[in-house]
């Protein structure tokens, strides 16, 4: 005979008691499991508390040591280095903007004058500072203008900057040094690096032109044509684009 639940059917008291007992039993099991887990965790912590405290102490000492170093050592060092850089930087800036006598000014920037630190002094005395990093760039440019190309490469290669324009100029200057040394393959690598670091109307035309000429020196006519075409298309009116016109005609 088929069975069905009548509308309004209610569980008997015995059934309700069984359900409640089951729920109570399940809850008790959950709490028992939690208690056991907690007990095991407490036991593990108790057993290894010396190790845990040691790790916490090491981390705390490391953080405090780093903060102390930054505030008590590095910050004053940065300030002192920046102050010392002011003097040779004056000679460097004057040399860059000079129409004549630039080499003598570059020498003063590199060697120092009037008892003040030179760019090289700052690199050696204040390693790891922002001033020393900038001094690397300026020393590299100074050596490049003094035709001391290997020294220029050494200092410019050690320079790094978040300023993409300055980073591009450094790469391009390394390329110039390698061209002067007759190492055109290395020069082209750095001209390409300069172009990849940043695109702007100031440095990009210069390095496109130099890359094109260097590619020609290496016998790469198609590569050279590509650089000159970019100049002609994207930097109309620049002196480099005008120079590229002659090369394009020669390559056609």
Image (cartoon, helix red, strand yellow):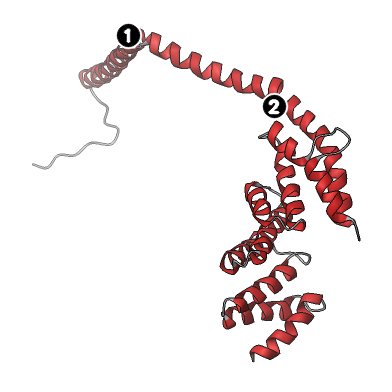
Residue occupied by mark 1: 47
**Point 19% across, 39% down: residue:** 4
Tag 2 or tag 1, which sits nearer the N-term? Answer: 1
Q: Quadrant of residue 169?
A: bottom right
Cα distance between the residues tagged 1 and 2: 41 Å
Report helix, strand or loop for mark 1. Answer: helix
Look at mark 2 in the image and give the residue it sits on. 74
Q: Position of residue 187 (x, y in %)?
A: 62, 65
Residue 126 can be seen, yes or no: no
Q: Is residue 159 above or below residue 147?
A: above
216 sits left or right of 32 in the view: right
- Which of the labelled discs sits on residue 230, or is there none? none
Furthest toward the left, the residue is 1
Q: Residues within 10 Å of mark 1 (few under 14, many from 20)?
A: few
Report the side of 54 relative to 148 (left or right): left
Q: Nearer the viewer, mark 1 or mark 2?
A: 2
Q: Is residue 135 visible?
A: yes
The kind of secondary structure element at disc 2 is helix
- Whether residue 190 is situated above or below residue 215 in the rendered picture: above
What count of labels does the image hold? 2
Q: Quadrant of residue 250?
A: bottom right
Question: Which image quarter holds the C terminus?
Answer: bottom right
Residue 223 vs residue 184, the one in the foreground: 184
Q: 247 and 69: which one is in front?
A: 247
Query: Residue 44 falls in which quadrant of the image?
Result: top left
Q: Nearer the viewer, residue 64 or 72?
A: 72
Measured from the top left, where is residue 237 in percent x and y? 82, 78
Instruction: Categorize mark 2 by other alpha carbons within 10 Å: few (<14), some (14-19), many (20+).
Output: some
Where does the N terminus fall, quadrant-wise?
top left
Please state the horizontal and vertical placement of residue 88, each as a whole percent of the image.
83, 41
Q: Position of residue 156 (x, y in %)?
A: 67, 51
């Amino acid at each position: 005979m088929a069975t069905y639940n009548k509308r309004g059917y209610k569980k008997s008291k015995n059934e309700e008691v069984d359900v409640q007992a089951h729920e109570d039993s399940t809850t008790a099991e959950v709490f028992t499991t939690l208690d056991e887990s907690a007990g095991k965790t407490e036991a593990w912590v108790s057993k290894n508390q010396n190790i845990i405290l040691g790790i916490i102490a090491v981390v705390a000492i490391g953080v405090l040591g780093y903060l102390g170093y930054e505030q008590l050592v590095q910050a004053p060092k940065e300030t002192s280095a920046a102050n010392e850089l002011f003097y040779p930087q004056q000679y460097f800036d004057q040399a860059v903007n000079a129409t004549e006598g630039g080499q003598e000014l570059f020498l003063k920037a590199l060697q120092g004058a009037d008892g003040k630190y030179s760019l090289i002094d700052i690199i050696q005395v204040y390693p790891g500072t922002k001033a020393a990093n900038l001094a690397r760039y300026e020393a590299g440019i100074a050596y490049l203008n003094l035709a001391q190309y290997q020294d220029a490469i050494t200092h410019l290669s050690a320079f790094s900057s978040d300023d993409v324009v300055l980073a591009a100029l450094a790469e391009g200057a390394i390329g110039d040094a390698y061209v002067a040394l007759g190492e055109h393959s290395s020069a082209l690598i750095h001209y390409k690096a300069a172009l990849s670091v940043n695109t702007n109307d100031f440095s990009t035309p210069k390095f496109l032109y130099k890359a094109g000429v260097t590619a020609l020196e290496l016998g790469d006519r198609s590569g050279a044509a590509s650089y000159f075409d970019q100049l002609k298309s994207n930097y109309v009116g620049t002196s480099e684009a005008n120079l590229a016109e002659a090369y394009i005609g020669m390559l056609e």
